[in-house]
Image: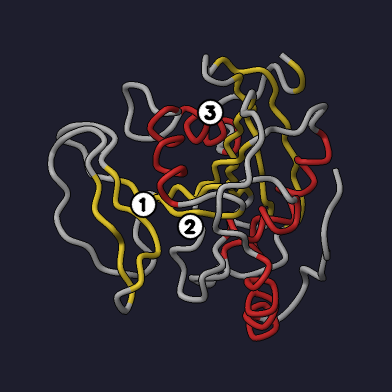
Amino acid sequence: MQVTGMHAWQVTPEEAIEIQKQLRHQVILRDDLGEINHVAGVDAGFQNEGKVTHAAIAVLEFPLLALREVAIARCRTSFPYVPGLLSFRELPAVMQAMDKLTRLPDLLLCDGQGYAHPRRFGIACHLGVLTGIPTIGVGKTRLTGQHQPVVNQRGAWQPLLDDKETIGAVLRTRVDVKPIYVSAGHRITLETAIAYVLRCTTCYKLPETTRMAHKYASGTLEAHIGLL
């Protein structure tokens, strides 16, 4: 995997914010996708009272959504929990997991924000810029912005606004279930990101990519690591 402009990870929160400000100008918010044959979920959990980061990448064949490969990496957690700086806590382990994949996915769905971020550079943007792979942010909770109520219908959504700028979408993927927060990460538009999230979502609230990655990142599933 070719990584663009890798930077230091063991930095202060102030230095991390400056890195975000420098890299956010590299984010591409237009559709620049090739053929999508494999999509992947990216998630990270923490073990040993937060001292160890446990990252997982679950690659699914698209559009079948059949699991094809899983890569897991563990490393010492070197950055504190700071809202808005999630990528500096999780990406060191995620990047190690990316290196273990036998094939790179065509699209990454990250458990976290993309452009819907105070500095417009959430973990999905960060991972996309570093890897060059199109990315989408799929968050369970809102980090910033305001929105109107979402109609109780699958596929309904409202723009997530921050100072009148649309930074993401509040998307209902299942009736009678709270919506999720979708935003462009890199090399994709918001509208296309919404479409792919819906195509990756079956009968659950979260996309299958996110669900599978979370099971491995949380340690719920440990077997069958590697090519499936």
Residue corresponding to mark 1: 181
* Residue 42 position within the rendered picture, expressed as x and y whole percent measured from the top left: 60, 41
For badge 2, the amino acid type reads: Gln
Residue corresponding to mark 2: 113
Residue corresponding to mark 3: 212
Task: Name the N-terminal-most of marks 3 and 1.
Answer: 1
* Residue 118 position within the rendered picture, expressed as x and y whole percent measured from the top left: 46, 75
Looking at this rendering, what residue extends furthest in the bottom direction?
14
Disc 3 and disc 1 in contact, CB within 8 angstroms = no
Q: Which residue is drawn at 47% across and 31% down?
A: 211
Question: Is 222 displayed left or right of 167 in the figure?
Answer: right
How crowded pointer 3 is (Cα within 10 Å; few <14, some 14-19, many 20+) is rated as many
Q: How many dots with numbers?
A: 3
Disc 2 and disc 1 in contact, CB within 8 angstroms = yes
In the rendered structure, find residue 195 and report the number of the disc placed on it.
none
Task: Name the N-terminal-most of marks 3 and 2.
Answer: 2
